[in-house]
Amino acid sequence: MVSIGYTAMGEQSGPRQLVDDAVQAEQVGFDFLAASDHFNPWLREQGHSPYTWAVLGAIAQVTHHMGLMTYVTCPTVRYHPAVVAQKAATIQLLSQGRFTLGLGAGENLNEHIVGNGWPAVDLRHERLAEALQIIRPLLAGETVNFRGAHLDAEGARLWDVPSTPPPIAVAASGPSSCRLAAEYGDALIAVEPKAELGELFDAAGGKGKPRVGQVPVCYDQDRAAAVRRAHEQFRWFAGGWGVNAELPGPANFAAASRAVQPEDVAAQIPCGSDVGACIDAVRKFTAAGFTHVALVQIGGDHQTEFLKWAERELLPALRSSL
């Protein structure tokens, strides 16, 4: 059976609310929680972006059985991979083995802020491969000395290491990143329900490993209100990964999505209270071989009503249908 997750989306909620929402998500029956790791929101209307790792530490202490993961962290620009390994080991210890480290090549939106520029996609993949060669042995308790073309580590060692290292899931959107995910990862992450990504992952050695997807929804009893909110806060979604990875700030996402209409967003995102539409959106991922799907409720002020609806209607329907 597919595992259904809840997304703690820091771009639309402050840290205390994210923790409170995570508690409720576990109580209503979500299997895991995916936490975004951004420095900026995509759009000014979203209005938030707290430090994800502090939020995850708090969530680890107030939840008990729900899996936790980053969706996703870039370990090459804003963070050094040795520091990412230290964060991951700590969350794995705090959560008593419930954490998965989701990693990816990053977005300009979050990484340019340290002033080191934004590398081309091939260099981003090279840097990610080097980061994984640093992170894996650190999580295994080894001392790491690494000299790469892009990244170095000097006498790095973690002093608090979990007995079971957290699994590493790697985000992929094409052949190169699928090969990286298969070679270095324990799972694949993708934001599009493309069966060919799983096929590429399998061909590169990922056969049998989990695949994690994500589905945005905008629940509201008033469908028109849901469409308006989805357009206001999620119209950036229409740009696609090839565009979204390159834009440097909320103003750029606003400009790039100026022509996106509410009906364009509603055509991509289930809006309203139609359980069947949400099932169809999740089924696109399961049909493509995904084993885990995290839902994103759009609108920071609308999480509680979504979670109540999920407990009452959506989760039972998903579990009986998938």
Image (tube, helix red, strand yellow):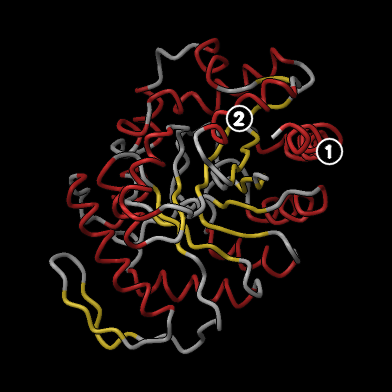
Give x and y (percent) for residue 188: 44, 50
Q: Quadrant of the N terminus?
A: top right
Q: Say what amino acid the circle numbered 2 marks.
A: Arg
Q: Is residue 270 left or right of residue 287?
A: right
Q: Looking at the rendered structure, which numbered label has been put on residue 200?
A: none
Residue with the mark numbered 2: 283
For residue 70, above or below residue 266:
below
Label 2 sits on a secondary structure element that is helix
Which of the 4 image quadrants contains residue 233? Answer: top right
The answer for how far apart the CA atoms under marks 2 and 1 are is 22 Å
Q: Is residue 5 visible?
A: no
Residue with the mark numbered 1: 308
Q: Say what amino acid the circle numbered 1 marks.
A: Lys
Give x and y (percent) for residue 256: 35, 23
Q: What residue is drawn where x is 70% and y is 50%?
A: 17
Which of the 4 image quadrants contains residue 194? Answer: top left
